[in-house]
Amino acid sequence: MDALKRTLKEKIIDTLNLMDLTPDDIADDAQLIGGDFGIDSIDVLELVVMIEQDYGVSIDSKELGAKVFRSINALAEYISEHRTK
């Protein structure tokens, strides 16, 4: 699970061009949406596409997205449970 969390942090940084951050700057339990990283609804759409393409996991509602993108821990757990790739 730690490897998945590290990879997710790297992919988030790359996908959203957060080049001033490193994976170590993102705590596993830090709030992603509306938190210190400036991730907004457009960014979430980009992350949803990345997750669907890279992991075969669908996030198909706003409510689910709010739950899944709560933190790296929540995102990694959801991907682990639903991954097809």
Image (cartoon, helix red, strand yellow):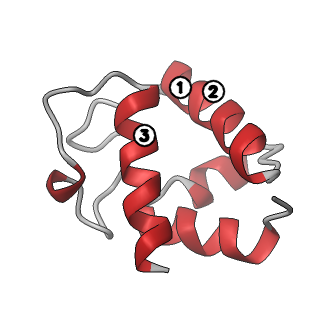
Amino acid type at circle 2 is Leu
Q: Earlier in the sequence, mark 1 or mark 3?
A: 3
Amino acid type at circle 3 is Ile
- Locate residue 58 relative to residue 40 in the image: left or right: right
Q: Mark 2 points at which residue?
A: 45
- Locate residue 59 relative to residue 34 in the image: left or right: right
Other residues around mark 3 within 10 Å, as few (<14) / some (14–19) / many (≥20)? many
Label 2 residue SS: helix
Mark 2–mark 1 Cα distance, whole angstroms, equals: 6 Å
Residue in view at x 34 percent, y 36 percent: 13
Amino acid type at circle 1 is Ser
Judge by depth and name the residue closer to the eye, 66 or 10.
10
Of labels 2 and 3, the one closer to you: 3
Q: Mark 3 points at which residue?
A: 12
Label 3 residue SS: helix
Other residues around mark 1 within 10 Å, as few (<14) / some (14–19) / many (≥20)? few
Mark 1–mark 3 Cα distance, whole angstroms, equals: 14 Å
Other residues around mark 2 within 10 Å, as few (<14) / some (14–19) / many (≥20)? few
User: What is the number of callouts on the image?
Assistant: 3
Q: Mark 1 points at which residue?
A: 41
Q: Are marks 2 and 1 in contact (CB under 8 Å)?
A: yes
Residue in view at x 79 percent, y 53 percent: 57
Q: In which quarter of the image is residue 19?
A: top left
Residue in view at x 49 percent, y 25 percent: 43
Q: Where is residue 21 in the image (x, y as percent from the top left)?
A: 17, 38
